[in-house]
Amino acid sequence: MSSSQRRRRVPKYCRHKARGLARVTIDGKDHYLGPYGSSESKERYRQIVGEWLDQQQADSLHEQTDVRVCELAVAYLRHCMEYYRKDGVVTREYGCITDALKHVRQHYDLERIDRFGPKALKTVRESMIEAGWSRKYVNKQIGRVVRMFKWGVAEQLVRPTIWQALQAVGGLKRGRTDAPEYAPVKPVSDEVVEKTLPHLSSIVADMVQLQRLVGCRPSEICSLRPVDIDRSADVWRYQVVGHKTEHYGKSRVIWFGPKAQAILSKYLLRDPEAFCFNPSELPNPRRTAGDRYTKDSYGRAVRRAAKKAEVETWSPNRLRHSAATVIRKEFGLEAAQTVLGHASADVTQVYAERDQQLAARVARELG
């Protein structure tokens, strides 16, 4: 047992049998309190133990002030490496946290954490702005930095007052900062997609057309397997496993109508557990291929094809925006919200347990 664990154990009120006296042992020293069971002995016990607890708190705070920013960052990243995982793979959140903490450590690596206050946080924020990060992303990254200090409080590495002070730093406001405003992602036009398709492999071309019909995320297309698809009804149902909001207890269902089924059918004649879209099945794969596309390799293939087609560079995620625009125009905001799996209508506006029957109807008519 560590010394810190021993300090946290409150000394007991005990009886010295031979002398009939109450006593308490602190740091190996006996303190006699008077006749065992008497009110005087109990009052004396509370006084001595109270003084001991005050000293423990003072010692704990002294230990906390000795922790440096670099030590907190290393401990937090070790925690994040294990915490931010999905299916055994580290998620993008870990990378974002790492990027945020680089700016903290650049300026305050050897600083004691008790000296890292709101002004220090603003200096870190300015460093992020100078790096060219957008206003919204800077706000998110500063939130990640503050979250590290919150974690430090829970681990008794940081005094609560330090974390509370950092929360006083407000987010950057539109028009009141030098941080740029990045334009929202726009839908990709059908004309651009059609000109790109001939320059794609047959597999990626089918992925593009399927995603354009159903409005799913690139990662959801890449992860598709025959076993995941319920084909018992006229509209097929794909229950996504490991989607981005699964840890909030939300479900994600994608529906495949007749047009989508026509594209997908030829990819279902395989091991039910195998991925539908496998780059190694191409006649002449570009390099040693894995058994599936990732959202990154899928995106690279689309960007290369767009360059060959001499059209604007675009990414597969814009197909989701295109689908949102079409669905909203034909069926309304609620339908777009349901099909795309958004938790709130506000998110769907940006894209331009819900009624899944409505989502199936959209797939039946559009996809």
Image: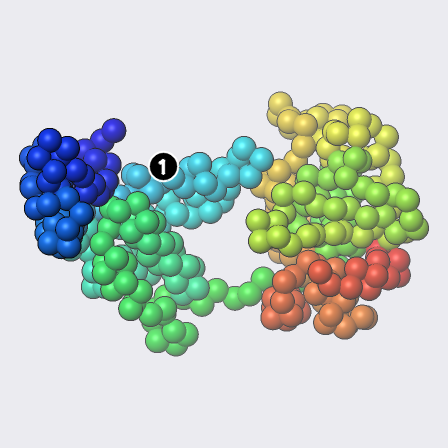
Q: Quadrant of residue 358?
A: bottom right
| Closer-to-camera residue (224/48) | 48
Q: Which residue is mark 1?
A: 78
- Mark 1 nearby-residue class (10 Å; few <14, some 14–19, many ≥20): few
> In this view of the protein, which residue sits in the foreground, 97 or 43?
43
* The N terminus: image quadrant: top left
Q: Say which quarter of the image contains residue 302.
A: top right
Residue 232 in the image, given as x and y percentages of width and height: 90, 44
Q: Residue at x 63, y 67 (%)?
A: 344
Say which quarter of the image contains residue 178.
bottom left
Residue, x 15% and y 51% (percent of image)? 38
Task: Using residue 187 as the reference point, say whether residue 210 is left or right of it.
Answer: right
Quarter in which the C terminus is drawn: bottom right
Give the SS element for disc 1: helix
Place of residue 115 in the rendered image (x, y in percent of width and height, measured from the top left)? 15, 55
Residue 206 vertical placement versus 259 (above, below): above
Q: Residue at the spot x=58%, y=41% of the render?
A: 296
* Residue 192, horizontal then vertical, whole percent: 71, 56
The type of residue carrying mark 1 is Arg
Q: Residue furthest right?
A: 234
